[in-house]
Image (cartoon, rainbow, N blue to C red):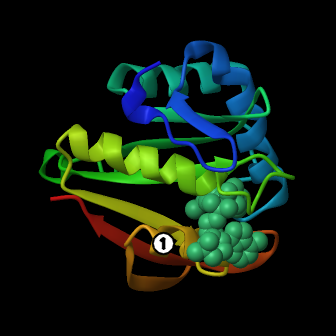
Amino acid sequence: MNPIYERERSAVTVRPARSGDVEVIRAIRNHAIEHSTALWTQTPQSSAEAATWLAAHLERGSAFVAEADGEVAGFAVYGPWRALDGYRHTVEDSVYVREGRHGLGIGSALLAALITAAREAGHHVVIAGIEAENTSSIRLHERFGFQRVGVIPEVGTKFGRWLDLTLMRLALS
Ligand SMILES: CC(C)(COP(=O)(O)OP(=O)(O)OC[C@H]1O[C@@H](n2cnc3c(N)ncnc32)[C@H](O)[C@@H]1OP(=O)(O)O)[C@@H](O)C(=O)NCCC(=O)NCCS
């Protein structure tokens, strides 16, 4: 385990993800797809899609998991914000904590590790795109210095209603 990624708070350890974490990450992600507006789709990720998605992160070193009580309790990833090369110094983060373990500091431990790793990788800005009513995620990001830079009304839809996107930004350098 790389000590850079170790973060202790409420007995939580954050470490780089491994390929063997794929199914637990997929389960956490698919739960959010099914039950929340955190991810704006109702199509669950298949095992094959999850493996391809995680492999790209493992190659970049941009995926992390939090372990608590001997199990993976959450994950965080960062990846390119937009595809064109002019955006190459900007990344977007995602943080997901297993249902039943919210509010225990796990999301904070994950985001702290992700920010450290993104800074060490030389990135300049981290963006978070958050459903505007997701107060937990907005609060989590504010805690780490992200600032709200705007809200784009009604750019998404799920569960029969329009969704607004809050954009938050953290400068790393
Ligand atoms: C958002 C999420 C990642 C936060 O992780 P977490 O482990 O619950 O958060 P933490 O315990 O580290 O707390 C971080 C901050 O969020 C706030 N928070 C946590 N749960 C909250 C809740 N239910 N309501 C309001 N604020 C909450 C805490 O107050 C804390 O800030 P503070 O300590 O300065 O008050 C987690 O709730 C989650 O996985 N939600 C579902 C998926 C999701 O929405 N992901 C983000 C997509 S953009």
Which quadrant of the figure shows ligand 1?
bottom right
* Observer able to see residue 46: yes
Looking at the image, how many numbered discs can be counted on the residues?
Answer: 1
Left or right, 63 with reference to 31:
left
Quarter of the picture holding the C terminus: bottom left
Residue 160 screen position, x and y as percent: 81, 74
Residue found 41% across the figure and 22% down from its top? 2
Query: Is ligand 1 closer than 8 angstroms to the Cβ of mark 1?
Result: yes
Q: In the figure, 154 relative to 74: above or below?
A: below
Q: Quadrant location of residue 38?
A: bottom right
- Of the residues shown, which amino acid type is indicated by label 1? Arg
Residue 56 screen position, x and y as percent: 42, 24
Residue behind mark 1: 143
Left or right, 45 with reference to 101:
left
Q: In the figure, 24 relative to 166: above or below?
A: above
* Observer able to see residue 156: no
Residue found 59% across the figure and 19% down from its top? 51
Residue found 60% across the figure and 35% down from its top? 13
Disc 1 is placed on an element classified as: helix
Residue 48 screen position, x and y as percent: 65, 18
Q: Quadrant location of residue 27?
A: top right
Residue found 44% across the figure and 64% down from its top? 128
Label 1 neighbourhood size at 10 Å, few (<14), some (14-19), many (20+)?
few
